[in-house]
Image: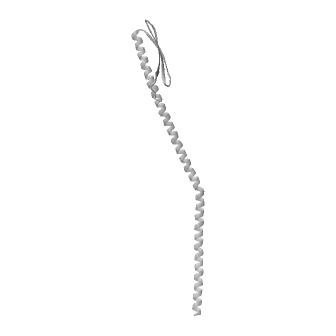
């Protein structure tokens, strides 16, 4: 039995050495995996703030472009409204002038006039010369403009 016991004890020793070696290999691979994970985590911690800063800068750029677009649109609308108001006033002035010229021809008198348009009113001075004498009209007409 001693030979059998010796073989069993040698076999146990071989199994223990193999188990130790396999455990060493497993621990080495686990250590390698843990170090690899740690390296990736360190790299990610360095990269994440840069990514977040790029994202923040991109959002700021988009916001600024939208702001400029809004300001430009508002400017165009204000310009269009002012131009429309100016064209209406110009049409009114031309209508008045054409009526004055037509009246001058029909009455054989002379109508002289001048006007000045400010932002909120139209100043008008007319001098009508007929046979009986001059007649002067001065008016300040408020313009129907909403502020």
The location of residue 10, given as percent across then percent down, is 59, 86
**From the viewer's perspective, is residue 123 above or below residue 130?**
below
Q: How many marks?
A: 0
In the rendered view, how is the structure colored?
Answer: one colour
Residue 133 or 88: which is nearer the viewer?
133
Q: Residue at x 52, y 39 (%)?
A: 68
**From the viewer's perspective, is residue 33 above or below residue 59?**
below
- 103 vs 51, left or right, is left
Q: In the rendered image, which quarter is residue 100 located in?
A: top left
- 119 vs 12, left or right, is left
Which residue lies most toward the left here?
A: 106
**From the viewer's perspective, is residue 9 above or below residue 109?**
below
Q: Residue at x 42, y 19 (%)?
A: 95
The location of residue 78, given as percent across then percent down, is 48, 32
The location of residue 139, given as percent across then percent down, is 47, 17
Q: In the rendered image, which quarter is residue 42 located in?
A: bottom right
Which residue lies most toward the top here?
A: 132
The location of residue 15, given as percent across then percent down, is 57, 82
Q: In the rendered image, which quarter is residue 106 located in?
A: top left
**From the viewer's perspective, is residue 77 above or below residue 137?**
below
Which residue lies most toward the bottom here?
A: 1
Q: Residue at x 60, y 77 (%)?
A: 21
Quarter of the picture holding the N terminus: bottom right
Residue 23 or 89: which is nearer the viewer?
89
Q: Residue at x 50, y 39 (%)?
A: 70
């Amino acid at each position: 039995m001693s030979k059998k016991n010796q073989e069993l004890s040698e076999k146990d020793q071989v199994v223990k050495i193999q188990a130790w070696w396999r455990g060493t290999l497993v621990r080495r691979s686990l250590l390698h995996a843990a170090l690899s994970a740690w390296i990736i985590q360190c790299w990610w911690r360095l990269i994440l703030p840069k990514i977040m800063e790029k994202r923040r800068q991109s959002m700021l750029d988009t916001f600024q472009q939208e702001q400029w677009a809004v300001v430009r649109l508002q400017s165009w609308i204000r310009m269009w409204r002012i131009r429309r108001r100016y064209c209406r006033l110009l049409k009114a002035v031309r209508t008045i002038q054409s009526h004055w010229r037509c009246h001058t021809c029909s009455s054989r008198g002379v109508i002289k006039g001048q006007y000045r348009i400010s932002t909120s009113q139209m100043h008008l001075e007319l001098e009508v010369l007929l046979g009986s004498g001059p007649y002067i009209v001065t008016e300040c007409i408020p313009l129907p403009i909403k502020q």
